[in-house]
Amino acid sequence: MQNRRQEILGILLLIISLCVLVSLVGFNPSEEPRISPKVKLTNTMGIVGIYVSYGLIKLGFGYSVIILPLLGFAWGWWLFSHRKLENLYRISLYLFGAMLLFSISLGQITILVYEGNPPHLLYSGFTGWSIANLTHDFLGGIGAGVILIGGWLLLIRGYFSWSFYHPFQTAGKWIQDKWNSFSLER
């Protein structure tokens, strides 16, 4: 019984993810949810696709939301094929964090390029731009940049388990060895 539910949930997730992906790919910035019924729709998912893409791209986190249906595909396939979900949790959290950071980073770049008056917010989305604008207002451009760089470093360090200290340690040892050899030559 549990396997049957898991397969059904996996299939539903695959179908929903496919619909969301088609909606996002068919996104047209000029189409709004309150579009006139006389205007021909270009989104391949129709009016539902317009609402989904408008909500996720324009109001949400910009073009980086393409990660969401891809994660939905992965989760759907994992459920459908009865794989262990523990392997997918970590990757999903890091990809979701990367989506948020990417959107906020694009919002910060938009603020710096257009000096707070952007013509559109498609790349970062309204939510990503709003978070970037909030951090920019509180911390300034340099402070917001430092926070974003720190966020990216934490995300990369957490996922890949790289040591950022190791190169400094190696360089310090090399400098110390050179200093000691220089002192001995005198």
Image (tube, rainbow, N blue to C red):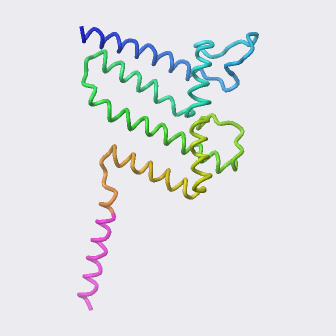
Q: State left or right for residue 18 relative to residue 29.
A: left
Q: Residue furthest bottom?
A: 186
Question: Which of 45 and 170 lies nearest the eye of the viewer?
Answer: 45
Q: Is residue 147 above or below residue 83?
A: below
Examine the image and state in which quarter residue 110 appears. top right
Q: Is residue 51 above or below residue 110?
A: above
Which image quarter is the N terminus in? top left
- Determine the residue positioned at 25% across, 82% down: 181
Q: Residue 170 in magenta?
A: yes
Which of the image's four quarters has the C terminus? bottom left
What residue is at 67 percent from the left and 19 percent from the top? 33
Question: Which residue corresponds to the image point at 70% horizontal and 42% vertical from the top-left?
Answer: 118
Would residue 162 appear left or right of 49 to someone viewing this image?
left
Q: Is residue 36 magenta?
A: no
- In the image, which residues are magenta? 168-186
Q: Main secondary structure of the magenta part?
A: helix
- Name the spot of residue 144 as percent of width and height, x first: 55, 53
Quick check: 16 above or below 109?
A: above
Where is 126 relative to 164, above or below?
above
Residue 15: horizontal and vertical position, in percent?
44, 13
| Residue 105 position by quadrant | top right
Residue 153: horizontal and vertical position, in percent? 41, 51
- The residue positioned 31% from the left and 30% from the top of the image is 88
Q: Picture coordinates of residue 12 (x, y %)? A: 40, 12
